[in-house]
């Protein structure tokens, strides 16, 4: 990319040494000029080594701290090293590298601080299972109502962020266990602009491990409701002239 | 109230104060965690030397047996202690998270620095 601004693609990875090299190679092939940072989230396999050999920058957390913490580590890295935009992307190959270009292009327009990649807006092969679809519809309704515009995929982990969004996401306000719909609401209430563009995502194959199994979805829904509720409660307090705690 | 349980309560409350103060003195327990335990022993002490108080409270909360009153407040106390621990654990998790992130970022900076130094050595 000929632009002077710098783009970092943050890929949080936990035990992904089977997929990570392919993802990095694909991104480097499609997106020239962007750095790829793999945040190795305390993997017990060779994720870090494989990623470094594949040409990515690697930051290794000393133990497994979860997806959100790994992502936030990437945001902190980007802020420290003066990157202008971050694209966050999954390490399992679900996110199509070509869509990174669209996300960056949209972020560069400067009309939004958070650019969401939606699997439902355009042509996409993603077909979530019934339970997950219900969850997505629910949070879609809540987020769209709070944000005041239609957000079709509030649980998307494929996003581009500009520097001011990064500054918010690097603080303790960022919920690090399952950051998604609640983060969007927080960003919106903090005055950040959110937009959405279509991206391509692939469904997980059955043999892949998933965070959407067992009792996790139940906890997820509970956590998301609680998180959204307290985010909204905090906002009411700020409206009577209080600065947000993370400012 | 019977004399036996009153002496027992008295002895335990005094022992608890001694234990807590000793732990704080040896820096095994931080001052900010000692106050809940000290107030527990104070409450036990007051109840032991003032027998009418327990009956009064029992009457006040509508309990029949004064033992129920003791069990009820003991449970409330334990719950409060647990909430305090949950709050502490939450803040410690945040601190551990921040430390781990900072450590990982610093390690990356050091590795990059030594990699660059090697390149310069090779060139020189």
Image (spheres, coloured by chain):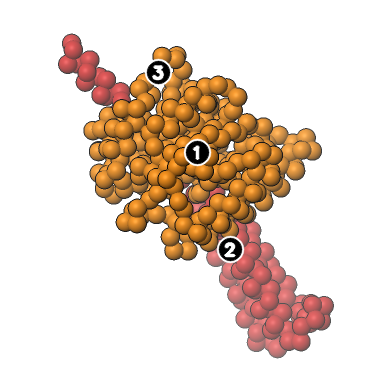
Chain colours: A orange, B red
Instruction: Give the residue drawn at x 58%, y 29%.
Output: A113
Depth check, front residue: A149 or A220: A149
Label 3 resides on the chain identified as: A
Q: SS for tag 1? A: loop
- Looking at the picture, how far across and down is residue B28, in whole percent? 49, 56
- Looking at the picture, how far across and down is residue A62, in whole percent? 35, 43
* CA–CA distance in space, label 3 to label 2: 55 Å
Numbered disc total? 3
Q: Is residue A137 visible?
A: yes
- Looking at the picture, how far across and down is residue A190, in whole percent? 66, 35
Marks 2, 1 in one chain: no
- Looking at the picture, how far across and down is residue A41, in whole percent? 37, 44
Q: SS for tag 3? A: loop
* CA–CA distance in space, label 3 to label 1: 25 Å
Based on the displayed image, in which of its 4 quarters is residue A238 positioned? top right
Instruction: Give the residue drawn at x 65%, y 87%.
Output: B4
Q: Which residue is mark 2?
A: B82
Q: Which residue is mark 3?
A: A1
In the rendered structure, the answer to whether residue B62 lies left or right of residue A198 reads right
Based on the displayed image, in which of its 4 quarters is residue B123 positioned? top left
Depth check, front residue: A232 or A173: A232
Instruction: Give the residue drawn at x 21%, y 20%.
Output: B118
* CA–CA distance in space, label 2 to label 1: 49 Å
Residues at badges 2 and 1 in contact (C-beta under 8 Å)?
A: no
Depth check, front residue: B84 or A32: A32
Q: Which residue is mark 1?
A: A122
In the rendered structure, the answer to whether residue B28 lies left or right of residue A36 reads right
Depth check, front residue: A179 or A172: A179
Label 1 resides on the chain identified as: A
Judge depth for marks 2 and 1 and give the one in front. Answer: 1
Q: Is residue A78 visible?
A: no
């Amino acid at each position: 990319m000929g632009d002077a601004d710098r783009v970092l693609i943050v890929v949080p990875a936990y035990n992904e040494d089977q997929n990570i090299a392919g993802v990095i190679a694909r991104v480097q092939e499609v997106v020239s000029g962007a750095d790829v940072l793999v945040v190795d989230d305390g993997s017990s396999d060779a994720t870090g080594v494989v990623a470094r050999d594949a040409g990515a920058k690697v930051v290794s957390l000393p133990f497994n701290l979860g997806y959100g913490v790994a992502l936030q580590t990437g945001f902190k890295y980007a802020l420290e090293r003066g990157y202008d935009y971050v694209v966050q992307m999954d390490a399992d190959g679900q996110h199509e590298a070509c869509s990174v270009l669209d996300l960056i292009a949209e972020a560069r327009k400067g009309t939004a601080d958070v650019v969401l990649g939606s699997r439902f807006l355009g042509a996409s092969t993603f077909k979530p299972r019934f339970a997950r679809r219900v969850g997505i519809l629910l949070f879609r309704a809540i987020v769209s109502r709070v944000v005041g515009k239609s957000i079709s995929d509030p649980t998307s982990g494929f996003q581009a962020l500009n520097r001011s969004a990064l500054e918010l996401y690097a603080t303790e306000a960022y919920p690090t266990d399952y950051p998604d719909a609640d983060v969007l609401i927080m960003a919106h209430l903090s005055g950040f602009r959110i937009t959405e563009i279509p991206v391509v995502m692939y469904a997980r194959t059955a043999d892949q491990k998933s965070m959407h199994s067992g009792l996790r979805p139940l906890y997820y829904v509970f956590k998301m409701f609680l998180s959204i509720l307290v985010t909204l409660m905090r906002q009411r307090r700020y409206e009577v002239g209080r600065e947000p705690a993370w400012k | 109230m019977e004399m036996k349980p009153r002496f027992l309560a008295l002895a335990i409350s005094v022992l608890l104060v001694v234990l807590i103060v000793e732990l704080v003195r040896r820096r095994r327990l931080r001052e900010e965690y000692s106050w809940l335990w000290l107030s527990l022993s104070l409450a036990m002490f007051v109840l032991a030397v003032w027998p009418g108080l327990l009956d009064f409270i029992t009457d006040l909360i509508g309990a029949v047996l004064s033992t129920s009153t003791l069990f009820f407040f003991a449970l409330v106390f334990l719950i409060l202690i647990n909430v305090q621990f949950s709050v502490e654990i939450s803040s410690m998790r945040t601190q551990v998270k921040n430390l781990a992130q900072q450590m990982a970022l610093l390690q990356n900076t050091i590795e990059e620095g030594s990699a660059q130094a090697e390149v310069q050595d090779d060139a020189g």
